[in-house]
Amino acid sequence: MTIENLSRVARVNGVPINSAGEELVQDVLQQRAYTELLRQAAQHAGLLPADDPATADGVISEAAADAINVLVEQSVQVPEPSDEACRRHYAAHEATYRTGERVRVRHILFAVTEGVDVVALRKRAEGVLLDVRCHDGQSADVFGPAAGQYSNCPTGAQGGDLGWLSAGDCAPEFARELFGHAEVGVLPRLAHSRFGLHVVEVLERDPGRAQSYESVRGAVAGALRQQSFVTALRQYMSLLAGAAAIEGVALDSADSPLVQ
C-alpha cells in the first residue's frame, strides 16, 4: 500500500473524489473512483435521481448505495457453474472443504491506526518477518521475544501465542491466510487483516476431516459463482473506467467487452 500526497484533486468525469492536499492510501482513492463511476452509471441507467449529491469524502447517499446494488445485479451476469467445473474445483481445493480444521498459531501484530505511516509500518513489519524467518527452526526462540518487543496485540506478553484456532475464531481475511494450507512454521509473507499486518507462525495443524463432494457441492458452486462474479465485476468496472474521463488516479480500463 502506498500513500499519495495529492497536490491536485482527482476527478471522475469532472466530479472530485478527494480534497486538495488530502493524503490517501492509493487503494482508498481507487475505491472512491470506482464508487463514483458506479454512482454515475446508476444515474445514467435511471436508477438514481440526477440530483443525487456527489461528495469528495467517499461517502455516498443511502439511495446511491441501493441504486448501485441494483445496477450491479442487472449488469454483472454470473453463469451457473457446471457439475464438471465444481468437481474439478473440489479436487484441487479438497483441503478447503475439510471440517474441524484447526491451527496453533502465534503472531506479531503491527496495527494500522489512524495517522500511522503505512509505508514505514510495512517496512518495519517486513524487517521483523525477515529476522524471525532467518531463525525459524533453530533452537533459540526469536519469535517470542520479537512479539514481546514489537506486537501491538496483548498476546505479545505471551510471545504472541493465539493458541488453537478454527476458521470461525478469526476475521475472514485472516482465516484465508491460515486455513486450507499445509505450511508449518513462519509464513513467508505478511498476513493482512482489518487490524493491521501480521507476522504469523503456524506451530501445528490439525487437518480435520475430509467431506465428500456431494455434501459440499453447494459450497463449491457458491465459491465458483463468487469467482465468476469478481471477474465479471472487474470487467464491468474496467469498461466504465474506459468510457470515463479519469483525472489524478490510475484505474484499470478497457474499451471492449471482450477484454477479460
Image: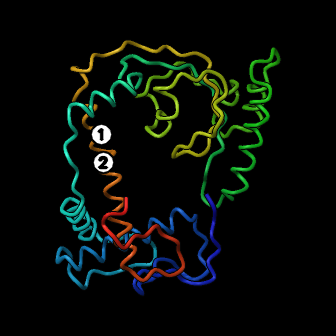
Mark 2: give few (<14), some (14-19) or many (20+) Cα within 10 Å: some
Residue 159 drawn above or below residue 57 = above
Mark 1: give few (<14), some (14-19) or many (20+) Cα within 10 Å: some
Q: Amino acid at mark 2?
A: Ser
Residue depicted at x 53% and y 74%: 249
- What's the coloring here? rainbow
Q: Secondary structure at mark 1?
A: helix
Q: Secondary structure at mark 2?
A: helix
Residue 68 drawn above or below residue 243 = above
Query: Foreground: 134 or 118?
Result: 134
Q: Amino acid at mark 1?
A: Leu
Position of 248 compared to 49: left or right?
A: right
Work out how far the residue at label 2 is from the one at label 1, CA to CA, in angstroms: 6 Å
- When asked about the image quadrant of residue 235, the answer is bottom left
Position of 181 compared to 127: left or right?
A: left
Q: What x and y, as percent, mark residue 10?
A: 51, 80
Residue depicted at x 66% and y 40%: 152
The N terminus is located in which quarter? Answer: bottom right
Q: Residue furthest right?
A: 140
Q: What x and y, as percent, mark residue 58?
A: 43, 70
Number of labels in the image equals 2
Q: Which residue is mark 1?
A: 224
Query: Foreground: 258 or 108?
Result: 258
Position of 215 compared to 145: left or right?
A: left
Numbered mark located on residue 228 in the image: 2
Residue depicted at x 37% and y 58%: 260
Q: Residue furthest front?
A: 258
Image marks 2 and 1: residues in contact by CB distance under 8 Å: yes
Query: Foreground: 53 or 242?
Result: 242
